[in-house]
Structure formats: structure tokens, C-alpha cells
Amino acid sequence: MTAVFITASGTELGKTFVTSALCRQLRAKGQSVRALKPVISGFDEQTAPESDTYHLIAAMGETPEPSLVDSVSPWRFKEAVSPDMAAAREGRSIPFKKLVAHSRTAIEAHEGPLLIEGVGGVMVPLDDKHTVLDWMTALKLPCLLVVGSYLGSLSHALTAAKTLETAGLPLAGLVVSESEDCPVPVEESVETLRRFLPETAVRIVPRQKGKIDWNAIPDLTGLLDGLNKNLS
């Protein structure tokens, strides 16, 4: 079993894209991979096929049967706002202990690579007391940090990395998902990040336009090599 938590320095930076790419690449290498996004806001039943949950199910090569949707994303909310707000607007809440238990059960049950995608960024609130960081800390999993390349992204990326370090969470790698509005070549941003995070593996995911060519995504599986020798 190899489990990794995929988080980000903010929202709409490409966590699901990176998770999907990693999932497809692991499958191409013969790995039995499973992906979860236990909490999702902005999930509308009318447009469910366009949701992150359905994208992850497609990346696993599965059909989005109701039971599988419930397993991948048991806490789904319609409003595209922070999870605590989205839940409150539906008169619901995210039971933190059950969220952690759901994640742990999946970790224990799956023998191959397990990718747990968070919601929003590192410090997004889940309820009145807990953030995504608390969720990650409870699981004590290595993290993949997805960041952008927009103006200000360096500060956001380094702040998120420092937050994970302070919490004692190992950073398995950092993925720079190229932003649409990119003031400098993404390679320059990566050079800066490597200077401040010399022990962290950094990968670039170039921005794609139109239909996604998954074969054009750089291999991200090497970021997991140190977690499980069977992935090499």
C-alpha cells in the first residue's frame, strides 16, 4: 500500500488534473490505483459528468455508478464555496472523525497506490474547528503540493510548503501547474522554488488547451518512488 495526499496552495490550481494524470500514469504502469476526493463543493447533479469526482472515476477506468460516486466523494455539496459554508447552506456538516475514518479505511483496504485529493487549499475550513491541514495531520500521509505560476504564486507555494513542514508532514513533491496568466516563463518560477526547497522534487505540468492529451503530461509517478519501491 502506498497512500499520498494531494493538496494545493489554493483553489482551482489543478489538483484534480494532477491527480487524474497521476492515476492514469500509474495504471499505464500496471498499478492498481484508487483515487478519492472525499469532500467536494460545487457538485451539481445536473452537471455531474463534468465534476472532479467523475473525472477521477474516469481516470481509474471505472463507470460512475452511484455506489462508486458515494465511495469516492461521500460528502458532496452544490455551492462552489468553502466546504464549511457549502455544508451549512444545506443544513449539513462534515463530520471530521468520519472523514478521517473514511480515509483510513480506504488506506487500509487498498493494496496498490491510493491518491486522496483534498478540497481547496491547505488551510481551507472543513467545519468550525478543522481545516484540510487537520485532516492531513490526522492521516500523517506524505503530501504532493500543487501550485500555480500566476503572479504571487511563489509566496503562496512557499507558505503552503512551510505550513506542511511545520505540521510535520513530509512533502513528497511539488507540482507546478502552469497558470493561464503566467507573468514569467514557468521554468523561472521552478528555479526559484528549487532554490528555496532544495530537497523537494519539482515537476511542471504545462497548460493544455482544448482536448486533453494525457500522453503529453510529464511522468509524475517518480514523485512516489520514495514511498514504495514497487512503484519504480
Image: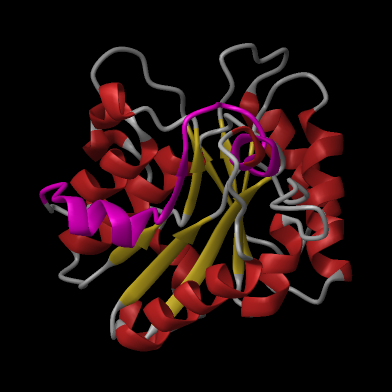
> For this rendering, which residue is in front, 228 or 80?
80
* Residue 24, position as x, y percentages in the image: 24, 52
Q: Say which residue appears at 78% left-offset and 19% top-offset.
A: 151
> For this rendering, which residue is in front, 86 or 35?
86
> Which quadrant holds residue 231?
bottom left
Does the magenta segment cover residue 76?
Answer: yes
> Which quadrant holds residue 222?
bottom left
* Residue 223, position as x, y percentages in the image: 49, 64
Q: Say which residue appears at 30% left-offset and 82% top-offset.
A: 110
* Residue 215, position as x, y percentages in the image: 23, 39
| Stretch in magenta | 63-87
> For this rendering, which residue is in front, 72 or 201?
72
In the image, residue 21 sits, relative to residue 103, either above or below, namely: above
The number of discs equals 0
In the image, residue 216 sits, relative to residue 226, either above or below, namely: above
* Residue 144, position as x, y percentages in the image: 58, 59
Q: Is residue 184 visible?
A: yes
Q: Is residue 53 left or right of residue 133?
A: left
Q: Is residue 193 left or right of residue 6?
A: right
Q: Is residue 108 left or right of residue 161?
A: left
In the image, residue 134 sits, relative to residue 187, either above or below, namely: below
Q: Say which residue appears at 22% left-offset and 58% top-offset.
A: 68
In the image, residue 228 sits, relative to residue 16, either above or below, namely: below
Residue at the far front in the pictured view:
91
Does the magenta segment cover residue 198?
Answer: no
Q: Is residue 148 left or right of residue 221?
A: right
Q: Is residue 232 visible?
A: no
Give the quadrant of the N terminus.
bottom left
